[in-house]
Amino acid sequence: MEANWFIALPFPAASLPREELTRLPAGTRAFAPADLHVTVAFLGAIGERRALDAWARLDTGDALPLPATIGPRAVFGPPRRPSALGLDLDIGAEKSPLTHCIAAWRNEVRAAAGLAAEERPVRPHVTLGRPPRRTDAAWQRALAIWIDQYAAHIPVTLERIALYTRAEPGDWRRFREVRTFPARSGARQTR
């Protein structure tokens, strides 16, 4: 099975309140702090060459670092069978720098990969975990409590952008950064 590729802004897990990754409803598969990200463009199973073509087209200009505000907890997908749990960013700020940049970048890189434009509205968010494959009434109640117990609005700065794919077998992470800009200190990955 071909690995999926995507371009995203690595999310600084240190910006989250400590309990965010430890108090998800029981049974939720939490992401490791190093796997947290804000998706810019999902590319799918397009192969490495096309993914690198998309990455080469990306022009961030002087947009980085990007300020954002961590908003409320959120459920993604159908409410009774969600696909992910996370946090919305810049909620109600349609003209925020983060929303503007994602809108400007995503279809540019999708076109470079030979993909159709993304039609859905931009919804900046960070996924914290995936729910269990089967949820029951108890999990749904825990989810409702989890959502209702959080209302903080915390500033965060997104400093890098990266091209990701699935992590290597045996790796503790879900995702692997293939390219990053600006490069991390000591990293060999370049734009």
Image (tube, grey):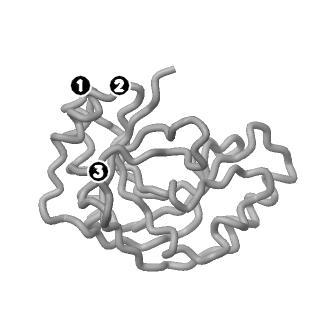
Residue at position x 30%, y 47% in the image: 179
| Mark 2 / mark 3, whichever is N-terminal | 2
Residue 78, x across and y down, in percent: 62, 42
Crowding at dot 1, Cα within 10 Å, few <14 / some 14-19 / many 20+, comes out as: some
| Residue type for callout 2 | Ile
The residue that mark 3 highlights is: 189
Mark nearer the viewer, 1 or 2: 2
Q: CA distance from mark 1 to mark 2?
A: 9 Å
Position of 4 relative to 72 (above/below):
above
Tell me: residue 102, above or below residue 115: below
Looking at the image, residue 15 sits to the left or right of residue 190; the answer is right
Q: Residues within 10 Å of mark 2 (few under 14, many from 20)?
A: some
Image-quadrant location for residue 48: top left
Identify the residue under disc 2: 46
> Tag 2 or tag 1, which sits nearer the N-term?
2
Query: Toward the viewer: 140 or 70?
Result: 70
Counting residues from the N terminus, which is met first, the one under dot 3 or under dot 1? Answer: 1
Which mark, by number, is residue 114? 1
Determine the residue positioned at 54% across, 54% down.
127
Quote the CA–CA distance across marks 3 and 1: 24 Å
Q: Residue at x 48, y 38 (%)?
A: 166
Q: Nearer the viewer, residue 93 or 139?
A: 139
**Above or below — where is 94 with respect to 27?**
below
SS for callout 2 = loop
Marks 1 & 2, CB-CB < 8 Å contact: yes
